[in-house]
Amino acid sequence: MIEADRVVSTVCPYCGVGCGMDLHLKDDFIFKVTSDHNNIVNKGNLCVKGRYGYDMIYSKKRVTEPLMRKTPQRAGERSQAFDLDEWRQVSWDEALDYTADRLVEIYERDGSDAMAVYCCAKATNEDNYLLQKMFRALFRTNNVDHCTRLCHAASVVALQMAIGSASMSNTAAEVIKTDVFIVTGSNTAETHPIIGLQMKEAVEKYGSKLIVVDPRRVELANWATLWLPQMPGTDVTVFAAMAHVIIEEKLYNQEFIDQRTEGFEDFAKSMEKFTPEFAESISGVDRNLIIEAARMYATAERAAIYWALGISESTHGVDNAFSLIHLALLTGHIGREGTGLNPLRGQNNVQGASDMGAIPWHYPGYMEVDDPASADIWEKAWNVEPGGLNQEKGLTTTEILSNVGEGGVRALYIMGENPMMAEPNLNVTRHHMENLEFLAVHDLFINESGAYADVILPGASWAEKDGTFTNTDRRVQRIRKALEPRGHSLPDVEIISGLAKRIEDRLGRPGSAYWDYRDPEQVLIEMGEVVSAYRGIRYERLDEVGLQTPVPDEDHPGTPFLFEETFPRGRGKFHLLEYVPSAEAPDHEYPLILTTGRLLEHWHGGTMTRNSQLDVLYPEALVEMNRVDAARTGVKSGDTVRVSSRRGSIVLRANVTEKANLGVVFIPWHFHEAAANLLTLDELDPVAKIPEYKACAVRVELASEDELVNPEARTRRGRW
Amino acid sequence: MTEAIKLIIDGNSVTVPPGTTILSAAAELGTEIPTICYHDHCSSYGICRLCVVEVEDARVLQPACVAEVRDGMNVHTRSPRVERSRRTILEMLDSAVNLNEAPEIQAQLRDYDANPKRFENGAKRESIIIDDNPMFVRDYSQCVLCWRCVQVCAEDAQYTYAINFSGRGFETSIDTFFNQSLPESTCVFCGQCVDVCPTGALKPKREWLLEQGQTPDEIMQLTRMERRGRRRSG
């Protein structure tokens, strides 16, 4: 038995559930992770990532010294350098001076529009607030975004337009109090495993009925009363047909519609054409299942909807989200305990990073950048001269890269993101990266994006710094420093402040915005002075269970569920809907639909989990295929196949499984050896600018095992 | 229906709501009844019988973790009969199972004055250390069959059903179905089982490697094959 010399309570750095966890350390080595069984979020349960995925902080591949490229890189000829021999170890002074010099040189030559930054939904609220402040206050640009653009952007836009607020309306653990709940576009058991457990518990122990609407037979379908397997991209028809049934059979809540909504009459007319028969012809879902699901949801005492990226990551993601919001507005299943509209946020701190203003259209607290009154408030807060802040909306994540070049974006600062795995159609992303004039990357590893950089600034992992994360149900929780940053890596607040001060000096504006913070809490307090949702948050108040925003003052107990009396925009608004087919339909040449997503064992671009023991448990990408599709192509489980789209092709092994529905194949996007995003389509939703990750046309054919990048990596797993 | 139940535990009177177990009622009085299989956050099944108490007018000793209070009950938590029963349970466990890494049970052995020689020649539960995955190792020679791991793998937490009892009588052990390795079973490696294990039977691999004398640096330099663990034989 090993006796821990320290046990540190903190919060898991992986998904949006925000599980509490205790790190057991011996001589600064974490050898065990446990969780308090009384923790309100996860009740002592963790998933494999939380329990065992911490070890990337000790990885031999981690970058723990500031690095500069030996060969100077030029726009148009930028190359990737994964090998440490191609880098020179430098001091922090040299790295930060160089970064400040280059950023200021480009800013002074080409102006604000040449500057851009990717903030990071893995980093803390404090880190994100400071990074967007640096780019807004010093470089006067709103080209500030993060991976929410590739994630829930469509849900955020639709919720803002329909009710005026984009976060999860209810607490995740309330699912046991619901009578009927819909889970759609979410493989919750793998992507939000602890909320998945609570959903299973709701079904098994509390008699809740579950309706799963998903093109894959995800694990939760095994617990469902109804499973509606729609073809990818046809979500609007299924949910609009449910609305059609609810209206036709008068199952709606007239009182709620009269008092809390607007636009019902026109909306009801627009739903007439969405008959269950029409939905069946488009989506492939049996009309009777749609009718039954509509009746079950509408007639429940308490019903809730949970969704994730299957809804939002689409060229009509905003419409998809509207179709769900309408169901809640029709039936009044919102604003009470056990009901609600609940977009399950992916990253540990994507809610927080958005709250902190890491988005091109909003200052912290969702204050519009093109509203002079908001700009005025932040100019005062950041000691910027009147009219100094840029009031033009900035570029989104995908637009930042597609605007790289002369007259466009020249310099990019990336904190913790990995666009070279995450962007759709990486074949094009690569050229954008090559065309950057300057790239600074602030990360733990040299990942596929960092390999393009001029300078790498080694940040601290979540276990090496203090700060706060805001989880999917708006709970602000503390992370605590368990050990010193490895090597010469530094807490991110120090890196950003150090760089900002150098930039101020070079711009001749020393001491304009404030950059001398005693501790991260001061950063949060500075932000809370303007943003009321965080105003009442103090670190000591977070010690027990955290606080759910909004927390408008220091005595406020936090807000478990929203919209009891009213919506932030006043009345909930119905929007008219049309069915728009996916941007790319299967045809003779590319007969299957590819949908992408995550696995239980891995995280996103893999910077963390692929450098962890988790990678030993699940070392390779597998393409999931239905047995009929597999038989047509002569593929058996374990065979090597080539999957091709109009944009690229990858080679990986096949898994013939009942998880895959007929005509649909699934590939996880974590593996650089077979990067799913070489195949995906870089079409965007017109409003939310979110790419289409969930439906593109592909072809599968047998290939030879020699074509695999790493044939030794084999996954033999029995889990669902 | 009675609003509250009044009973006497070790001569002290206590009033509790209906449905309370004797274990919880005793805790109200600050009386600690020893347990092994019981866990605050698992369902109770009265498997280990260490928590038995003597209830006047009851024919046999009652397991306090599942027996519910009744009005007028008179409970003795440490009568000679209770002591004898607990001591025998502990002596039998001690004779068959390696309890070196179960400090709570060690303390109970001392508390009940257990005689290590009583079943000296009894059979020992033997097991190889099963190292078939990168996350944790299993040493069933330390397993007291408390069933907590099976419960959290099932409805108490994870709904995964990867493990259960296998074998009968003294040959009973915890295993996957069909003797599969854990990665090939339905296991999702949540580690809930490791968390609730009261002995050293289930242990994070990192902790186990440190015990084997490896340094953190050596552990981080293990190759992929070394980390994966051996495939299970036999």
Image (cartoon, coloured by chain):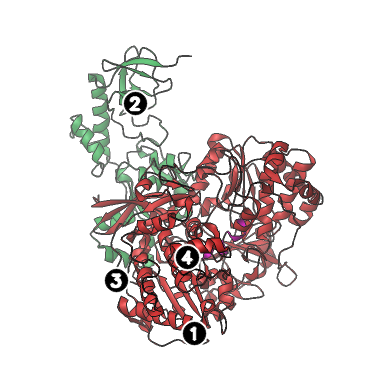
Horizontally, is A310 left or right of B91 in the view?
right
Front position in the image: A393 or A245:
A393
Magenta segment boundaries in residue numbering: A145-155
Q: Say whether marks 3 and 2 touch (CB < 8 Å).
A: no
Q: Please check whether the numbered discs 1 and 3 fall on a single chain.
A: yes
Q: Chain of mark 4?
A: A
Residue sitting at x 27%, y 66% = B217
| Marking on residue B23 | 2
Residue sitting at x 32%, y 71% = A64
In the image, residue A486 lies in the stretch drawn in magenta: no
Q: Identify the element where label 3 is drawn.
A: loop
Q: Nearer the viewer, mark 4 or mark 3?
A: 4
Quote the CA–CA distance across marks 3 and 2: 53 Å
Chain letter for the red colouring in the rendering: A
Q: Upstream in the sequence, badge 1 or badge 3?
A: 1
Q: Please check whether the numbered discs 4 and 1 fall on a single chain.
A: yes
Q: Identify the element where label 1 is drawn.
A: helix
Residue A78 x/y as whole percent: 49, 84
Which amino acid type corresponds to the residue marked 1 in the rendered image? Arg
Q: Identify the element where label 4 is drawn.
A: helix
Q: Say whether marks 4 and 3 touch (CB < 8 Å).
A: no
Q: Please check whether the numbered discs 3 and 2 fall on a single chain.
A: no
Residue on which disc 4 sits: A379
Q: Chain of mark 3?
A: A
Q: Say whether marks 4 and 1 touch (CB < 8 Å).
A: no
Which amino acid type corresponds to the residue marked 3 in the rendered image? His
Horizontally, is A719 left or right of A244 in the view?
left
Q: Say whether marks 4 and 2 touch (CB < 8 Å).
A: no
Q: Identify the element where label 2 is drawn.
A: helix
Residue on which disc 3 sits: A488
Local packing at callout 4 (Cα closer than 10 Å; few below 14, some 14-19, many 20+) is: some
Chain letter for the green colouring in the rendering: B
